[in-house]
Image (cartoon, helix red, strand yellow):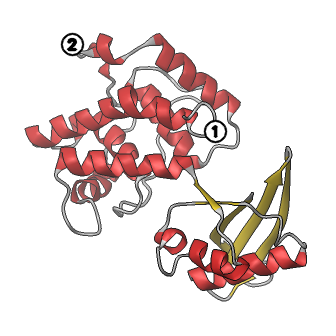
Amino acid sequence: MVHWDGKLLRDLTKSNHVDRLTVIITGNGVSQLLTVAKLPNSTCGEQAKAFVKTLDECDLREKVVALSFDTTASNTGRNQGACVWIEQELQKDLLHLAYRHHILEQLLQTAFTTIMESNAGPDALLFKQYQAQWKFIDKNNFASITNEEFADVVITSVTIACSEKYLRKRKDLRDDYKEFIELLLIFLGISPPRGIHFHVHGPIHHARWMSKALYSLKIWIFHQQFELSLKEYNGILQMCIFAVKMYLRAWRLSSGSCSSK
């Protein structure tokens, strides 16, 4: 199985940034980095060309049986996606294994759109307003649900123990994934292993699905310092409870192919 992902990284010899494609192959319990190729641009065509070129250089064209990739349209497009380009070039069908974390993040987008009746623009307006207010918020004055009447329904020792264990075990977690677990613990009234601190806000574009959980948790945690309508407050609270009760376990187990089923 071959995994690939494109990233915009700083050039090694210049101050500007360049598109690079990382290709990793796994099989029979072995994982091997094949290349971190420099690309002229990040289009699906250029990624597919670099991908196939790497397979040919490593004499792996005939051995590939599956593709592992994130769920961007440039990869999954039915007509011009990188997966289509690669299969056409290799002249065979391949098993598609999209990143499970990314698939589950689309559930956040659906939940947020349903609960909050999200605007049609590119950005979530509530998050944009909160982002502008962030510099005025006292980071030491935050709330948890421990004093809420429904706390016993949401807070469970299993959820807390599994979340803390996950943070300690997964040292390789992406920053936004790590922040997600830490915010959940703070929401539940627990100090994460690294202590309580709050990161600068990330992107608010609708395409950044994980932002729906991160911003919802932060907004509720600091809701006493940020003006919300009753409808917005209830919606944000529903998103937070959804993240704890419905989403967290599936998301946490999604990195394991057996346990995620």
Q: Is 87 placed above or below 14 here? A: above
Observer-nearest residue: 4 or 40?
Answer: 4
Q: Is 222 placed above or below 12 here? A: above
Q: Is residue 230 left or right of residue 252?
A: left
Could you tell which of marks 1 and 2 lies nearer the N-terminus?
Answer: 2
On the rendered image, what quadrant is the N terminus found in? Answer: bottom right
Three-letter residue code for mark 2: Glu
Q: Residue at 64% across / 70% down in the picture?
A: 6
Disc 1 secondary structure class: loop
Q: Is residue 239 left or right of residue 21?
A: left
Question: Residue extending furthest left?
Answer: 230
Q: Residue at 39% across / 63% down in the picture?
A: 207
Q: Is residue 179 left or right of residue 57?
A: left
Observer-nearest residue: 8 or 78?
Answer: 78
Q: Give the percent coordinates (x, y) of residue 21.
A: 70, 73
How far, Cα to Cα, is label 1 from label 2?
37 Å
Give me the disc on residue 257.
1
Disc 2 secondary structure class: loop
Q: Is 76 placed above or below 238 here? A: below
What residue is disc 2 on? Answer: 149
